[in-house]
Amino acid sequence: MNLNKLFYLCLTILITINTTTKIFSKNLKEMDNNLIRPEYLKVGDTIAIIAPSGVLNDHENYINKAKKLLESWELNVIIGKNVFNNYGHFSGTDKERTKDFQRALDDKTISAIWCARGGYGAMRIIDDLDYTEYLKTPKWIIGYSDITAIHNDLHILGSESIHSIMCKSLEDKDINNDRSIQALKDVLFGNKLSYNFNNKPENKLGKTSGQIVGGNLTLLHGLIGSKSSINTDGKILFIEDLGEYHYHIDRMLISLKRAGYFDNCNGLVVGDFSDLRKNTTPFGKNIKEIILDAVKEFNFPVLFDFPAGHEELNMPIILGRNIIMDINNSKSTIEFL
């Protein structure tokens, strides 16, 4: 073989390898960008009510209300065996709460799991949950606040989930006339989700896209350094919280910053920060100022006052779904793709 033939042979091999590598990289990127999407609900499907966290005080009121609501949507309802248990702060022992959740994950006839309430406790059971059967028949898992621990694991697993009201949220609601309830129903039954807001002066303008991830700031902070800590690269982070001091919110944001949460983040959506505590020494900044200060060196859009968190209006977010967020001088929009 002369040198010319050898040169062209090597060139052909290099081009083939380069093309194959590009295709493989593209496929990996596409796989990473499209999470598991459970099937939307239809009339006759079954939804399980499970309590993975805090104890359910006055449980009969809102669990019965939740059951009545779901039945009005023509869904079948299963209530976890241990939902009404009481073990100090928790709705049952860790083992009992794990057993209920695992049973619902494994049951192929269940199309969604609705968490009864948050509080604290999900982090204590997440390491004992097995998602093997869930991956064969994925289902929507719905909740917020303490349920962020479960949402994080689902995202790492590669599945979408729903940040939304829980059964306890129905306590003082008119189930026949409530925006949060109707919005959850729309999402579960596959209606397209989008939001439009008037612009706020504190917003940081820009247009961006990516998977929306996150949830309760305290939980996100508590999971840093664990296998349940999410990767926010190329994604849009959502945060909300309840009952914290201003200095503690600042500390948690700085912790997220030091952990790299903002380094390659594509955007920030800020939900409700409710019932904040007052320190004896004023912190000197309001919540929006604290957040903007934490991300001041990053060039991504920031949307404030998204109606999700511990307030009466708690609109759903499909965690893991790709969104387009556009914040301009006149309005802000979020479109779920």
Image (cartoon, rainbow, N blue to C red):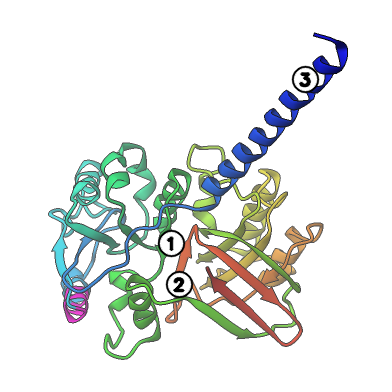
Q: Is residue 112 left or right of residue 80?
A: right
Q: Are marks 2 and 1 in contact (CB under 8 Å)?
A: yes
Q: Which residue is mark 1?
A: 145
Q: Residue at x 30, y 83 (%)?
A: 172
- At label 2, which amino acid type do we have? His
Q: Which residue is mark 3?
A: 10
- Tag 2, which secondary structure? loop
Coordinates of residue 237 in the picture (x, y in percent): 60, 59
Q: Which residue is mark 2?
A: 310
Q: Residue at x 70, y 76 (%)?
A: 327
The reply to whether residue 182 is visible in this rendering is yes
The span from disc 2 to disc 1 (Cα, nearest Å) is 8 Å
Disc on the earlier residue, 2 or 3:
3
Q: Is residue 320 magenta?
A: no
- At label 1, which amino acid type do we have? Ser
- Quarter holding the N terminus is top right
Q: Is residue 67 magenta?
A: yes
Q: Is residue 199 left or right of residue 54?
A: right
- In the rendered image, the vertical position of residue 71 relative to residue 78, given as above or below: below
* Residue in front for this viewpoint, 49 or 41: 41
Residue range in magenta is 65-73
